[in-house]
Amino acid sequence: MTKLTMIIDLSRCIGCWTCALGCKAENDEPIGIWWNRILTIGGNEIDTPSGTYPDIKMNYMPINCQHCDNAPCIKVCPVGALRKREDGIVFLDWERCIGCRYCLIACPYGIPAFNWRPPVQSPDVSQFKIGAPEVPVRPVGVAEKCTFCFHRVDKGNLTPACIEVCPAGARFFGDLDDPTSEVSQIIQSKPIVRLREELGTEPSVYYVPPRHAATPQEVAQT
């Protein structure tokens, strides 16, 4: 069996948004839609630290689809547009999606986005196909989310676009069922948390907490 897993090391993340931009370019995401986002752990508002100067702290927190083993989005989809592949990737079939947006409500991580209108690019390059040729252009009125770049996986490449472009080497991807894989070795050797584990969603994205700032509990509740 294969269980594709992503690990994000928050001690390495520098908040540059390169992963989000690489994902956006690879998957032809229009303005206003991000499959990858960078949140922050710190104050009550994004990009604000906790504490009082000079004793303040803040960490960057990348987030994308968690590809849950017990995915709420799959349970609520009335047409079976969301399905789990044998390798663990939660797949969204845009040809089946009817735009009900139940998945947006059900996801406890706020991940799916909805494209209300035709995609807009600036400058206008609508006459060209942007991104990987294997990634289809989505019709208007469907949900979108991270795919773990399964178009790359299906060609034998276990390097999603966000990992390929990360300048800090903060992301790792591989088969958790392979004990010799890098992700398996990281999970065995470092403290690991997953987001909102108390919900029983069993995410396939793991986080290595920052060494000196946010606690594992702060990470898990982000």
Image (cartoon, rainbow, N blue to C red):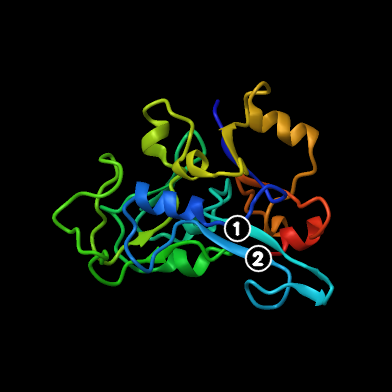
Estimate how packed mark 1 is, as few (under 14), some (14 to 19) or many (20 or more) residues with alpha carbons within 10 Å: some
Residue 129: x %, y % from top left: 20, 49
Residue reaching furthest to the front = 54
Tag 2's secondary structure?
strand
- The amino acid type found where label 2 is placed reads Thr
Q: CA distance from mark 1 to mark 2?
A: 9 Å
Residue 178's place in the image compared with 87, above or below, is above
Residue reaching furthest to the right = 55
- Residue located 77% across and 32% down the image: 188
Residue reaching furthest to the left = 127
Q: Which residue is mark 2?
A: 40
Question: Quarter of the image holding residue 118?
Answer: bottom left
Task: Tell whether label 2 touches label 1 (CB within 8 Å).
Answer: yes
**Relative side of 130 to 68, left or right:** left
Residue 139's place in the image compared with 207, above or below, is below
Residue 192's place in the image compared with 98, above or below, is above
Estimate how packed mark 2 is, as few (under 14), some (14 to 19) or many (20 or more) residues with alpha carbons within 10 Å: some
Quarter of the image with the N terminus in it: top right
Front-most of residues 174 and 162: 162
Q: Which residue is mark 1?
A: 15
Mark sitting on residue 137: none
- Residue located 25% across and 67% down the image: 120
Residue 135: x %, y % from top left: 29, 44
Front-most of residues 109 and 218: 218
- Residue located 57% across and 49% down the image: 68
Question: Quarter of the image holding residue 108?
Answer: bottom right
Q: In front of the other: label 1 or label 2?
A: 1
Residue 85: x %, y % from top left: 45, 38
Disc with the residue nearer the chain's start (1 vs 2): 1
- The amino acid type found where label 1 is placed reads Gly
Tag 1's secondary structure?
loop
Residue 124: x %, y % from top left: 20, 63
